[in-house]
Image (cartoon, grey):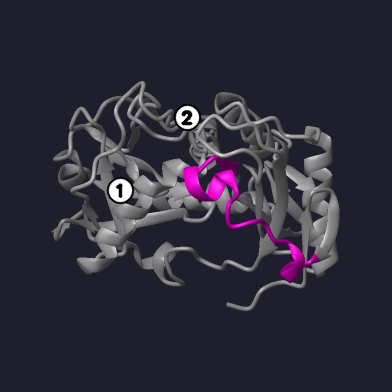
Amino acid sequence: MQYPDWIWHNGTIKPWADATTHVMAHALHYGSSVFEGIRCYDTADGPAIFRLTDHNRRLYQSAKIHEIDIPYTLDEINAACREVIAANGSTTDYLRPVAFRGLGGFGLSAETPVDVAVATWKMGKYLGDEALENGIDACVSSWQRFAPNTIPAGAKAGGNYLSGTLVAREARRLGFREGIALASTGLLSEGAGENLFLVFDGALHTTPVSAALLNGITRNSIITLAREAGLTVVERDLPREYLYLCDELFMCGTAAEITPIRSVDGRQVGAGKAGPVTRRIQALFFGLFDGSTADTHGWLERV
């Protein structure tokens, strides 16, 4: 991977290689970090960051859950995101703000300083260049999501992603592009790092936040855009077998954007390609960046 030249680290733009932390940092041993993934798109009016403030608000919400005191304001982190994009001279980037417990005392409850960084790099299509057009093959993982009142799924925390790593690596090992996890109830949760939408008779069905999933910004955007376009959206518990029976299926997230799923566990979903509802949602979403969908919510924040 070719790394960018600059990174924002603890209040300063510095060379990428200089943004280091100690091997005994609390976050490295205990997963005590919170982060966001944000995309910047080229638009007709210049580069814009998609829902920058909403993403970084969630960063602070995740930090609150885990008692991580971020030593910068929301406005300062927003400014850091813009600053690091400008420093690297790019306009279509993936942004990664991260706050983590650094080097201090030892032990789970140790008091440590909180380090903050904002990185940016070129990502492209997370699940492959052809994924948005042709769809992917997925499988249901043998690994389940955490049970309620154990690890809070509502926080976008580093430690949570050990679960997604197991799901994703198992899927790749078995020859699938991505994995889908069940909740501790045995009902559907989400993908390794993406939310799920199933289509039945033209209506979108998605699992609720109580199903051990992260309430994704892209998920929320799709629900909003779909309802404004007159589509029915239902949030409800869904059993595993509905993955095989739905008319269409797609996963969504900042990295994955809107990726159709053409098969699950070797069973073809619908016509085995992106269906009309999925195409409609893709058009509404990507239309925000080419101007064919009006940004009535102020989601595009200029660099």
Res 57 → quadrant = top right
> On the rendered structure, is 41 left or right of 263?
right
Q: Nearer the viewer, residue 222 or 25?
A: 25
Using the image as rendered, state which of residue 78 and residue 239 is in the foreground.
Answer: 78
Q: Please rate how many residues cluster around mark 2, counting C-alpha atoms within 10 Å: few if below 14, some from 14 to 19, many from 20.
A: some
Q: Is residue 273 visible?
A: no
- Left-right relation of 130 to 96: left
Q: Which mark is residue 289?
A: none
- Quarter of the image for residue 187 reads top left
Specify the quadrant of the image occupied by residue 135.
bottom left
x and y percent of residue 212 in the render? 35, 31
Residue in view at x 80 percent, y 36 percent: 72
Q: Height in image: 107 above or below 142?
A: above
Give the residue drawn at x 66%, y 74%: 3
Q: CA distance from mark 1 to mark 2?
A: 23 Å
Q: Measuring 81% from the left and 49% from the top, which residue is drawn there?
A: 80
Disc 2 is placed on an element classified as loop
Task: Name which of mark 1 and mark 2 comes first in the sequence.
Answer: 2
Residues rendered magenta in the picture:
15-35
What amino acid does circle 2 point to?
A: Gly
Quadrant holding the N terminus: bottom right
Label 1 sits on what residue type? Leu
Single out the mark in the foreground, 1 or 2.
2
Q: To which residue does mark 1 refer?
A: 249
Other-residue count near label 1 (Cα within 10 Å), few / some / many at <14 / 14–19 / ≥20: many
Q: Which x, y percent locates residue 294?
A: 68, 42
Q: Is residue 6 magenta?
A: no
Q: Which residue is mark 2?
A: 154
On the question of residue 236 being in view, the answer is yes
Residue 9 spot, x, y in % from top left = 77, 54
